[in-house]
């Protein structure tokens, strides 16, 4: 049996060439670190070499410390990345990082411990730890300010965004860009550098204090409790680089890194990092089911949603036909698309030439004749079952039997829609979130007849559109909208009991939502929820009472921002919600009509009343198999509904509180507010077994 080698060493032109080999991203795992350390020690002993070139064995230098192996860092006596970097800095040999592809997090910190850094033109470097609720814990907060100054270090570490090689050269992170073969270029660069100075330790460079920049960064960071813990600790560390010597700064950084590693915020964000990557793992999908190549697509319905979906196809470089019933409608759709691309050109996100190319791939039509040879159609017409069914009937007649027919419904029954299709196995739900060209979430809804090939194709197209596609089952509202019903119900009932929209929104913003439920309602249009409620009521009595307040507001013409008034009022041209006395009067009158004595409602109660329904419904969804795993629900809520990422999504949040606590709270709420709160059987079972949602592997 051959033993895997993580650090491949060869000697070239008097340099040890050490190649990191831990696919797919050269994560700095304990095994890789150990082998690199050994290579550093060996090179020190080797009198025949003057230095070492560190590079990736593939086209990636390193994606950073191995996130899945953080528990190893805490093991007493275990060598970690810091030991490796110290050995590199203290070596008498010259170390050169030759970076290709990426050097992120610990990967860049490894580079910063080297004496010199060169890279290919298409390399990205960065310290993205903040996105994991962490800080660069292997000297990044101490070395980067010494290399580029406090202000740029703050922007790099608190922003967490990757930096292109050219910009990194301008900042002083990378010393030289290599054209042509990286190793040859790196060896030549290494020889020239050694002549200037064989050692250039970043840790010995001086750094100027910059109190203004530190203060500004503190003010710009989210509050510690609202997801900004890592920002504040990172800023403290960068400040420490200016007040402490290097060794003391490293000790301070180490302490803060360990504090963050233990924090709920890091646990939530790391959970989401892996959850996001797990969504594409679909159990029981036939291994022979391959995605059908989509070379041409069509979108039916040229409204804002249809236009956004067409943009997604164009961004994925798939020509698309946009169809609606009249020339006027398709022209409006085309103008909308042109405006979006023009906006991207203006912001410098898209070149003129790329914009022209994309628009050349867009065609419009008012008839279905051109659909004979398309590989996929996404229907985005009005949310009405009859209309959708008639569209599918027509599509079924005209399209090839192999065309994938997707519906963008957000609430309707996929099986009902598929029932009119000749090939129901080709029908699937692709629920985009508005604005469809911006929002990353895509709920992919399988009907009972949907084939594995159709699922694989929808997942593949989602990826090509740079969406996070989550496969869910067919039920009323699927995962996201089914869960939001209870969240909104409770928010409105709290108004009847004593709260006001601005109070609830403030509490939910502090919890970490970008916007509270009422501000979101005003942004999206309260009339949408109104229509869905009316449609739902027409289908039969609701299992639980809803407040009338949402209906009253809409019937007063307060549809939201678009009518200048909703739960709030808006000054013309201003999107800032202003509390409105008229709304308060409506709410007080409703409490009075219902005979409710209004009371003070605490922030803690507000959070429980609106978030716990998500958890309880999520448990039912999980037990019914509508979601594959609890982390898929978390991904849906973070990317589709703005649930705070640092809390890891509603299911992870429940796991972090402890399911037995959530269960007890639900029983109490059931006692006080009725059977809406009855704990879901799965939640009860897991709570009794002292388990988590994450432990549940299917019914
Ligand atoms: O995966 C993309 C990415 O952005 N990765 C995360 C980069 C990052 O955040 N790095 C910082 C890590 S934390 C750190 O480095 C802490 C630190 O400062 C040192 C601590 C010192 C401790 C001492 C304290 C006393 C990336 C851009 C890299 C690649 O994107 P792609 O789209 O090409 O591929 P993905 O995202 O699908 O990833 C492919 C597979 O690789 C896994 N993976 C990625 N980065 C990883 C990682 N696994 C472990 N650690 C990482 N850093 C990823 O999960 C995926 O796995 P599969 O199984 O789903 O294929």
Image (spheres, rainbow, N blue to C red):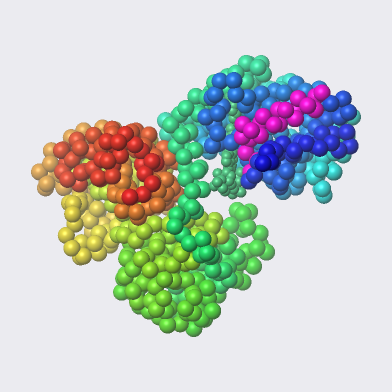
Quadrant housing residue 584: top left
In the foreground, 580 or 71: 71
Q: Is residue 343 left or right of residue 520?
A: right
Quadrant housing residue 30: top right
Image: magenta residue range: 25-45
> Does residue 422 sit above or below 616 in this rendering?
below
| Residue at left offset 69%, top offset 41% | 2
**Residue 582: where, in percent of width, then height?**
24, 47
Q: Is residue 322 visible?
A: no
> Does residue 59 sit above or below 540 in this rendering?
above
Q: Is residue 357 left or right of residue 627?
A: right
**Residue 12: where, in percent of width, then height?**
86, 38
Which quadrant does ligand 1 occupy?
A: top right
| Residue at left offset 10%, top offset 43% | 595
| Residue at left offset 41%, top offset 67% | 450
Q: Residue furthest toward the left?
A: 595
| Residue at left offset 54%, top offset 79% | 373
> Does residue 461 sit above or below 698 in this rendering?
below
The quarter of the image holding the N terminus is top right
> Does residue 490 sit above or below 411 in this rendering?
above
């Amino acid at each position: 049996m051959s033993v895997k080698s993580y650090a491949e060493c060869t000697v070239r032109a008097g340099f040890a060439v050490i190649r990191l080999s831990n696919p797919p991203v050269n994560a700095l795992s304990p095994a890789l670190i150990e082998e690199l350390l050994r290579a550093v020690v060996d090179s020190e002993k080797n009198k025949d070499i003057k230095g070492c070139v560190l590079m990736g064995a593939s086209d990636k230098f390193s994606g950073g410390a191995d996130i899945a192996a953080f528990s190893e860092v805490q093991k007493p006596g275990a060598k970690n990345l810091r030991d490796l970097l110290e050995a590199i800095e203290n070596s008498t040999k010259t170390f050169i990082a030759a970076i290709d592809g990426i050097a992120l997090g610990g990967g860049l910190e490894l580079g910063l411990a080297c004496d010199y850094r060169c890279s290919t033109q298409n390399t990205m470097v960065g310290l993205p730890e903040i996105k994991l609720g962490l800080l660069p814990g292997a000297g990044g907060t101490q070395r980067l300010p010494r290399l580029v100054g406090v202000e740029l270090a703050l922007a790099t570490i608190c922003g967490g965004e990757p930096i292109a090689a050219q910009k990194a050269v301008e900042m002083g992170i990378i010393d030289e860009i290599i054209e042509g073969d990286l190793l040859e270029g790196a060896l030549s660069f290494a020889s020239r550098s050694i002549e200037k100075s064989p050692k250039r330790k970043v840790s010995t460079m001086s750094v100027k204090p910059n109190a203004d920049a530190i203060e500004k960064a503190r003010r710009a960071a989210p509050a510690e409790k609202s997801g900004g813990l890592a920002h504040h600790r990172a800023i403290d560390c960068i400040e420490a680089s200016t007040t402490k010597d290097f060794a003391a700064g490293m000790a301070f950084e180490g302490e803060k890194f360990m504090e963050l590693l233990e924090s709920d915020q890091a646990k939530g964000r790391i959970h989401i990092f892996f959850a996001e990557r797990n969504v594409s793992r679909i159990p029981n999908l036939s291994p022979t089911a391959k995605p059908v190549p989509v070379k041409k697509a069509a979108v039916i319905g040229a409204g804002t949603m249809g236009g956004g979906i067409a943009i997604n196809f164009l961004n994925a470089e798939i020509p698309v036909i946009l169809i609606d019933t009249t020339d006027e409608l398709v022209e409006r759709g085309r103008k909308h698309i042109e405006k979006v691309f023009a906006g991207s050109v203006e912001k410098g996100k898209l070149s003129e030439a790329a914009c022209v190319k994309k628009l050349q791939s867009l065609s419009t039509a008012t008839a279905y004749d051109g659909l004979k040879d398309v590989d996929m159609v996404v229907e985005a017409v009005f949310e009405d079952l009859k209309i959708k069914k008639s569209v599918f009937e027509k599509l079924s007649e005209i399209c090839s039997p192999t065309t994938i027919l997707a519906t963008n419904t957000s609430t309707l029954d996929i099986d009902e829609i598929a029932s009119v299709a000749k090939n129901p196995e080709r029908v699937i739900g692709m629920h985009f979130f508005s604005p469809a060209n911006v929002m990353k979430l895509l709920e992919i809804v399988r009907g009972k007849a949907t084939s594995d090939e159709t699922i694989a194709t929808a997942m593949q197209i989602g990826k090509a559109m740079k969406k996070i596609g989550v496969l869910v089952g067919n039920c009323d509202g699927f995962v996201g909208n089914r869960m939001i019903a209870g969240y909104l119900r409770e928010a409105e009932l709290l108004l009847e009991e004593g709260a006001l929209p601005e109070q609830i929104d403030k509490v939910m913003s502090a919890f970490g939502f970008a916007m509270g439920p009422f501000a979101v309602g005003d942004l999206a249009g309260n009339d949408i929820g109104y229509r869905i409620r009316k449609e739902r009521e027409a289908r039969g009595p609701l299992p639980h009472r809803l407040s009338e307040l949402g209906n009253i507001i809409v019937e007063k013409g307060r549809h939201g921002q678009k009518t200048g008034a909703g739960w709030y009022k808006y000054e013309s041209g201003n999107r800032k919600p202003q509390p409105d006395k008229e709304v308060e009067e409506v709410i007080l009158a409703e409490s009075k009509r219902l005979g409710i004595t209004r009371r003070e409602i605490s922030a803690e109660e507000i959070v429980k009343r609106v978030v716990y329904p998500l958890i309880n419904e999520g448990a039912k969804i999980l037990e019914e198999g509508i979601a594959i795993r609890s982390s898929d629900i978390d991904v849906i809520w973070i990317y589709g509904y703005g649930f705070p990422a640092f809390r890891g999504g509603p299911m992870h949040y429940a796991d972090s509180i402890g399911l037995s606590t959530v269960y007890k709270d639900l029983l109490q709420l059931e006692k006080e507010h009725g059977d809406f709160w009855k704990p879901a059987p799965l939640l009860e079972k897991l709570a009794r077994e002292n388990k988590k949602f994450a432990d549940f592997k299917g019914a």
